[in-house]
Amino acid sequence: MSVTKEVPDAEDIRMSGTFLSKVFDGPYRSVPEWIGEMEKHVSERGMFLKMHYFHFAYCPICAKKYGHNAVYFAEVEE
């Protein structure tokens, strides 16, 4: 979950590393397809995918109104 300010009684975690990202549109059931696309995207760049992270910016109804609803971050290493 992303936040713009400190949340009381919540642990704040900051991530570091090297990441590639892509934006996707679609329902949650499309995640396995997106993983395949990202694995190909990473390997074409000669990198190894270490970890998958997804951020759904909008619920499906809001995504129709605002656009893209999922951001996929892949932690990578060369």
Image (tube, rainbow, N blue to C red):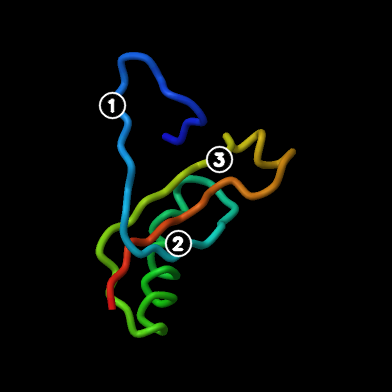
Kindly report which numbered mark, 1 or 3, lies closer to the viewer in this rendering. 1
> Of callouts 1 and 3, which one flags the residue occurring earlier in the amino acid sequence?
1
39 versus 11 height, above or below? below
Q: Nearer the viewer, residue 29 or 37?
A: 37
Q: CA distance from mark 2 to mark 3?
A: 16 Å
Instruction: Name the residue type under label 2.
Output: Trp
Q: Name the residue that disc number 3 marks.
A: 57
Q: Residues within 10 Å of mark 1 (few under 14, many from 20)?
A: few
Q: Residues within 10 Å of mark 3 (few under 14, many from 20)?
A: some
Q: Are marks 2 and 3 in contact (CB under 8 Å)?
A: no
Query: Within the image, what quadrant is residue 23 found in?
Result: bottom right
User: Is 46 displayed left or right of 72 in the figure?
Assistant: left
User: Is 12 displayed left or right of 37 in the figure?
Assistant: left
> Of callouts 1 and 2, which one flags the residue occurring earlier in the amino acid sequence?
1
Q: Which numbered marker is on residue 11? A: 1
Image position, residue 71 (x, y; %): 51, 52
Q: Are marks 1 and 3 in contact (CB under 8 Å)?
A: no
Q: Which numbered marker is on residue 39? A: none
Q: Which numbered marker is on residue 34? A: 2
- Name the residue: 32% across, 31% down: 12
The C terminus: image quadrant: bottom left
- Name the residue: 72% across, 41% down: 66
> Of callouts 2 and 3, which one flags the residue occurring earlier in the amino acid sequence?
2
Instruction: Name the residue type under label 1.
Output: Glu
- Name the residue: 31% across, 15% down: 9
41 versus 60 height, above or below? below
Image position, residue 48 (x, y; %): 27, 75
Query: Within the image, what quadrant is residue 62 found in?
Result: top right
Callout 3 secondary element: loop
